Image (spheres, rainbow, N blue to C red):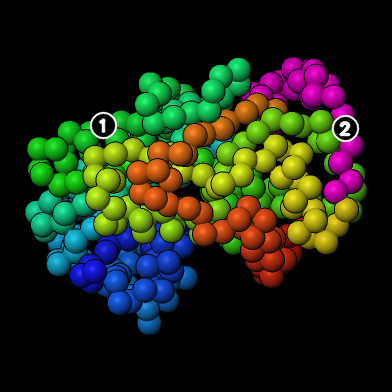
Amino acid sequence: MTRQRILVTGASGFVGGAVVKRLSEHPELYDVVAAGRSERGVDSSACRVVSGLELSEPAGWAEALQGVDVVIHCAARAHVMNDTSLDPLAEFRRVNVDGALNLAAEASKAGVKRLVFVSTVKVNGESTNHRAPFRETDEPSPEDAYARSKAEAEWKLRDFCKQAGMELVVVRPPLVYGPGVKGNFLSLLKLCNLPVPLPFGSMKNKRSMVYVGNLADFLAHCIGGRGAAGETFLIGDDVTLSLAELLKNLRRAQGRAAWLVPVPVFLFRWLGAVLSKAEAVDRLTGELTIDSSKARNVLDWSAPYSVQQGLKATVDAFHQRPQSGESA
């Protein structure tokens, strides 16, 4: 196989950093260019680091893109709860839509053959309650500003790449976890670390997730996979856990007993209505599952890490993190 030059955006971020690490483990196959705002957390001995680049300033990417065969675009304005921006959709569009198109235009000028775009399952929708798991052929149903920006980026990139003659691969992961995870999953880790019983024993709702190591491996498969060009893929771990099963696994990985109390789900919903937190309770108790068989069949891919391995690595990193005065 001919050695290829791969540029990864968002290289100092959670997903981008994992992709750089995965590709850098095979220098015989990949010449990695790690592009991001900073060099923080990027091993410069294993790749070429290009920092200080902004998606809003496309001209700055020309030099970094020289000789690049494939771009894996991980950089994005991430989904945040309780966004305080005056116009969240405009902010998301500025980075996730306009920025992606700026990058695609510069990549096309540089002769890049393929763009792998990391999107989100939220393009499909927010839940699979009372329906089959999400598939790539489903009609998109984005609900919040982040999801709408990603959906818009997908269709605009398809149009641009078709006209430019550049191959596009779209990857929609669900919740991504792994060492260094933040947001809701970090809150779960802190919750499971408390020496108290948790009232989630009745939470049988399934939630698809993907370990960051599995996602990075799949993105590597998208680089040269002949069947990937022009396709969209939903990608997840081999096993989908219920919320109760996830919490049990996290507690066991921390060396604790599961200690989950089976409080009826309707009590959570009642409490959510009383406290005006119905939306948050819906997310907690709802289902979101995906059918990722297309990724496995088209690219002959299988997850290199089991759910248990992924959760163990995540928990180990959680306990090794600097405490900085925060309570666990």
Give me the C-alpha separation between circle 2 and circle 1: 44 Å
| Residue most extreme to the bottom | 45
Amino acid of disc 2: Pro
Q: Which quadrant: the N terminus?
A: bottom left
Element under label 1? Answer: helix
Say whether residue 107 is left or right of residue 248.
left
Element under label 2? Answer: loop
Say whether residue 189 is left or right of residue 238.
right
At which x and y percent is residue 160? 16, 38
Amino acid of disc 1: Trp
Which of the 4 quarters of the picture holds residue 232? top left
Asked whether 302 or 11 is in front, the reply is 302
Mark 2 or 1, which is nearer the eye? 2
- The stretch drawn in magenta includes residue 221: no
User: At 46% across and 62% down in the image, what residue appears?
Assistant: 18
| Disc 2 to disc 1: CB gap under 8 Å | no
Residue 262 marker: 2
At which x and y percent is residue 306? 60, 55
User: At 69% across and 70% down in the image, what residue appears?
Assistant: 320
Magenta segment, which residues?
258-284
Residue 155 marker: 1
User: At 81% across and 36% down in the image, what residue appears?
Assistant: 200
User: At 20% across and 70% down in the image, what residue appears?
Assistant: 2
The answer to whether residue 230 is visible is yes
At which x and y percent is residue 8? 32, 60
- The stretch drawn in magenta includes residue 277: yes
Residue 241 against residue 181 in the figure, above or below: above
At which x and y percent is residue 79? 48, 40
